[in-house]
């Protein structure tokens, strides 16, 4: 049986890893930043073990099994009108988008420090925008392809999970209070990334490499999109982060809206 056909027919079952914790969901300073960015209580990570070997060929099948698994469904919640709800209809299909994840340092962000987005102090340069009254060069670089700084971080690098995570944090939730300096974004990105991603060291070269496979996912029931949200929204996202060696998967997601005001 060829690998692609096998991947299509493969089934997976999952068990919740209740002992797995994430420092970014416990660290007081990080929680304070997430509260300021209107993401607290809306950003989450849950881990599960699974029973068969994972290959990128099987990403779609893997995600479909995940969203249909009784153990997953017993703990999975979506947010509707500010209330956490279980998925009320069976998932009939999924869309998966493999997300490159190769970075083991923060060097990807180096160009941001020297291209005019930041002042020498690390403060973000403000700029005018027709719609947003309090706009800055950093958000413009992240969102606007017309920005002169858009490709200061190259096209390939912009596709990396590390960059996507940074962008998600910078744009925040509905009542986000944006930072005047870049450090909180960089430091929080680094912490969450290290929390979510598995690496290994080559015993001979001593080189560290990422082993995690990252898949951006969306699930559909008979009525249409059902997870992470019914409407497409850049800041409502879900990723499955797979450690193929440990056979662990983490669902990392955020539901755009008004975050909690207390830690």
Image (cartoon, rainbow, N blue to C red):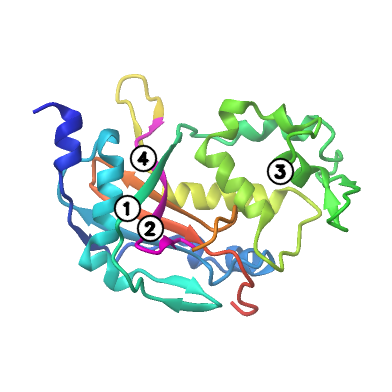
Position in image of residue 20 (x %, y %)? 33, 62
User: What residue range appears in magenta?
Assistant: 209-229
Number of numbered discs present?
A: 4
Q: Residue at x 53, y 51 (%)?
A: 191
Instruction: Assign the magenta stretch its main secondary structure.
Output: strand
Residue 114 visible in the picture: yes
Which sits earlier in the primary sequence, circle 3 or circle 4?
A: 3
User: Of circles 4 and 1, which is in front?
Assistant: 1
Magenta stretch: includes residue 58? no
Q: Which mark is residue 212?
A: 4
Question: Label 3: few (<14), some or many (≥20) within 10 Å?
Answer: few
Viewport quadrant of the C terminus: bottom right
Q: Nearer the N terminus, badge 3 or badge 2? A: 3
Residue that numbered label 2 is attached to: 220
SS class of the residue under badge 1?
strand
Q: Position of residue 213 (x, y in %)?
A: 36, 39
Query: Residue 180's spot in the image, x, y percent?
Result: 81, 54
Looking at the image, the residue that sits furthest to the top is 205
Q: With respect to residue 206, does 140 lie above or below?
A: below
**Nearer mark to the viewer, of 4 and 2:** 2
| Label 1 sits on residue | 93
Circle 3 SS class:
helix
CA gap, disc 3 and disc 4: 27 Å
The quarter of the picture where the N terminus appears is top left
Left or right relative to 155: residue 176: right
* Distance Cα–Cα, label 1 vs label 2: 5 Å
- Sequence-wise, the earlier of marks 1 and 2 is 1
Residue 143 got which mark? 3
């Amino acid at each position: 049986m060829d690998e692609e056909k096998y991947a299509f027919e493969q089934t997976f079952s999952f068990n919740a890893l209740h002992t797995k914790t994430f420092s970014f969901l416990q660290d007081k300073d990080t929680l304070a930043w997430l509260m300021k960015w209107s993401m607290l209580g809306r950003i989450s990570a849950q881990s599960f073990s699974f029973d068969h070997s994972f290959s990128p060929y099987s990403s779609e099948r893997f995600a479909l099994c995940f969203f249909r698994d009784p153990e997953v469904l017993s703990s999975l919640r979506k947010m509707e009108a500010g209330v956490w709800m279980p998925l009320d209809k069976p998932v009939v299909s999924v869309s998966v988008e493999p997300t490159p994840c190769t970075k083991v340092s923060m060097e990807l962000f180096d160009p941001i420090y020297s291209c005019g987005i930041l002042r020498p102090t690390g403060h973000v340069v403000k700029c005018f925008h027709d719609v947003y009254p309090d706009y800055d060069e950093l958000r413009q670089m992240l969102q606007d392809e017309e920005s002169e700084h858009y490709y200061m971080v190259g096209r390939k690098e912009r596709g990396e999970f590390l960059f996507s995570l940074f962008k998600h944090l910078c744009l925040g939730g509905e009542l986000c209070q944006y930072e005047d300096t870049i450090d909180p974004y960089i430091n929080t990105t680094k912490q969450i990334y290290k929390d979510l991603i598995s690496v290994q060291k080559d015993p001979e070269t001593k080189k560290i490499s990422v082993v995690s496979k990252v898949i951006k996912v969306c699930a559909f029931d008979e009525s249409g999109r059902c997870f992470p949200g019914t409407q497409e929204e850049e800041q409502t996202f879900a990723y499955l982060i797979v450690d193929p060696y440990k056979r662990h998967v983490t669902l990392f997601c955020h539901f755009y809206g008004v975050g909690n005001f207390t830690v």
